[in-house]
Image: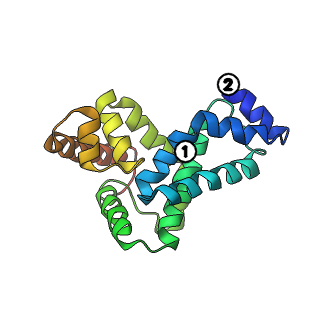
Amino acid sequence: MEDNIIVELYLLRDQAAVRQTAEKYGSRLRSLAYGIVKDTQTAEECENDTYIQAWNAIPPHEPRSYLYAFLARITRHVSLNCCRSRSRLKRSAFICQLSTEMEQCIPAPDDVECRIDDMALSEAINRFLAALHQEKRNIFIRRYWYMDSIADISKRFALSESKVKTTLFRCRNQLREHLEREGYTI
């Protein structure tokens, strides 16, 4: 079923919207959640929480042309919140490691000025990602959006782990330079 039809079902408050969403995107959302929480049952709970939040968020949002991205964002936030609330130390350490890597190239939102500038920062990062070669962009997104391990990325793209690490290092440096050109202080 097309995304715009599924969104229309949400707008009509038809429960078939949830069934259609689960049928079309359930396995991808569950996989995304599992990559963060590393537990099958918790990933299923995150997937179900995603449907509830989507039900409550549509309307006012109408993600007709970007339904999966809309759902993936919800799933990611639900999964991260689940990790935080359950104090899963091992997973939290991994998330902290990823945060530390990104702190090197993204300004921290410690002051009001940075918080106001979030949308512009998001657009600057999107421009950076759009300019990257497809393979580099995919590696970067798999690591920092989907939180895949270096080993998983290496297997997915049939690359050595050192190649993945080098690519990520260079991409972070390029992102830092791009953001500095855009006027951000790192």
Quarter of the C terminus within the rendering: bottom left
43 left or right, relative to 5: left
**Mark 2 crowd level (few <14, some 14–19, many ≥20, 10 Å Cα):** few
Q: Position of residue 122 (x, y in %)?
A: 49, 46
Residue 106 percent coordinates (x, y): 37, 55
At 35% across and 35% down in the image, what residue appears?
A: 138
Where does label 1 land, which residue?
72
Above/below status of 111 relative to 145: below
The residues tagged by marks 2 and 1 sit, at their Cα atoms, a distance apart of 17 Å
User: On the picture, is 105 further left or further right than 37?
Assistant: left
- Of residues 91 and 30, the one nearer the viewer is 30
Report the amino acid beneath label 2: Glu
Inspect this view and state whether residue 117 appears.
Answer: no
Q: Nearer the viewer, residue 60 or 5?
A: 5
- Which residue extends farthest front? 41
> Residue at coordinates 39% horizontally, 58% vertically from top-left?
107
- In this rendering, position of residue 185 left or right of residue 49: left
Q: Amino acid at mark 1?
A: Ala
Residue 3, x across and y down, in percent? 67, 29
- Label 1 sits on a secondary structure element that is helix
Residue 72 at least partly seen: yes
Instruction: Answer with mark 2 or mark 1, whichever residue precedes in sequence.
Output: 2
Residue at 67% in and 25% down: 2
Which quadrant is home to the N terminus?
A: top right
- Quadrant in the rendering for residue 104: bottom left
The residue wearing badge 2 is: 2
Q: Residue furthest right?
A: 12
Dot 2 falls on a residue whose secondary structure is: loop
